[in-house]
Image (spheres, rainbow, N blue to C red):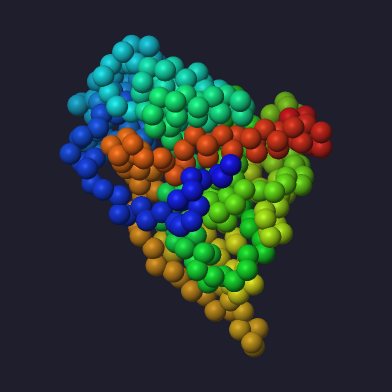
Amino acid sequence: MAVANEDSNNKAIEPYKVSQFAIMGAVQIAIVGCGHWGKNLVRNFSELGVLAYACDRNPETIEFIQRNHPQVECIDNFNDLLSKDFDGLVIATPSSTHYQLAHQALLAGKNVYVEKPLAQNFNEAEELHSIAQENDLVLMVGHLLLYHPAVNKLKTLIESGELGEINYINSDRRNFNPNHRRDSNVMWDLAPHDLSMMAYLLSAEPEDILSVRAWASANDAVVDVVHVDLVFPNNIGGHIHNSWLDPQKQALLTVNGSKKTAVLNDVFKENKLELYSRNADGSLTVEKPVYANDEPLRLECKHFLDCIENKAVPTSDGSNGSQIVRYLEQCQKMMSVGTLSPA
């Protein structure tokens, strides 16, 4: 089963060509979970003119939405929200609630966009995917980097042979984020981005997870640093480093090829993507490929709207989401055997 749908495995998305129907408000969207990350989704769907309902249990969050988005009806009960008439539900709640909320919404006939991870185990993720397929509903997972213009430019360069044969891919994602410790470990929080991006860029799933090394710094059984070594087809090596302990945020991807090495630094505001090649005299040539400057989250939101409108399969559909959960589960099992601290 491919990580992305068949079409998206063959070519990169061209997100800047997404239709503008959403501006006309042809689709109505509801969001549940409007806090830490959800507020960004509220902003985007509101600016697209399609946000009808927002649901959150925090009175301060509700007050903020009412003040800044007066056209949106605010609700504090999820069951009351599901009784409303709208086309798509966006779920941005803690990951432990994703399965239950998405399950209820799909059975209520709603198209669903759920933040990563899709669920906390593969069986639940597959169940959600099956329900969506059986009921001809859109199920999309928030694998944001699949919609990133720089990532899509890099995918095009890889597929054109610009980098040569790919040898190694490394993703380093770190920040200082102790607030997430209550709901998951660092791997479930950050690695969905790395795994989905790597598989998308290489148009291939990992063949094997080689090792998972982890550390729980507070000795509280919550892993906040993890290293994952994996291998992709054609003996392409891969490494993921995730950490919640770094006060200097890092989101750095390196793709080493036989001709050139690509570096994508997503912390930079511009020139995120650079290509390095070594000259005969040992010096380096640095190229800065041109790509669209669209906000990845805006493109992802538009993609969800287009999929609802056209009954299309999202690039990050339920199958894609399920496969990423499967890898996370496998890593978690290996972590419990070989970790430095209990998982």
Identified at 50% across, 18% down, the residue is 100
Say whether residue 136 is left or right of residue 200.
left
Q: Position of residue 200 (x, y in %)?
A: 53, 51
Identified at 64% across, 42% down, the residue is 243
**Does residue 54 lie above or below 13 as drawn?**
above
164, 144: nearer the viewer: 164
Q: Position of residue 117 (x, y in %)?
A: 54, 33
Identified at 62% across, 79% down, the residue is 278
251, 82: nearer the viewer: 82
The quarter of the picture where the N terminus appears is top right
**Does residue 75 lie above or below 280 as drawn?**
above
Q: Find the residue positioned furthest to the front.
A: 134
Say whether residue 138 is left or right of residue 175.
left
Say whether residue 136 is left or right of residue 172.
left
Q: Find the residue positioned furthest to the bottom.
A: 281
129, 27: nearer the viewer: 129
183, 23: nearer the viewer: 23
Q: Position of residue 46 (x, y in %)?
A: 26, 34
Q: Position of residue 39 (x, y in %)?
A: 37, 32
**Does residue 43 lie above or below 205 as drawn?**
above
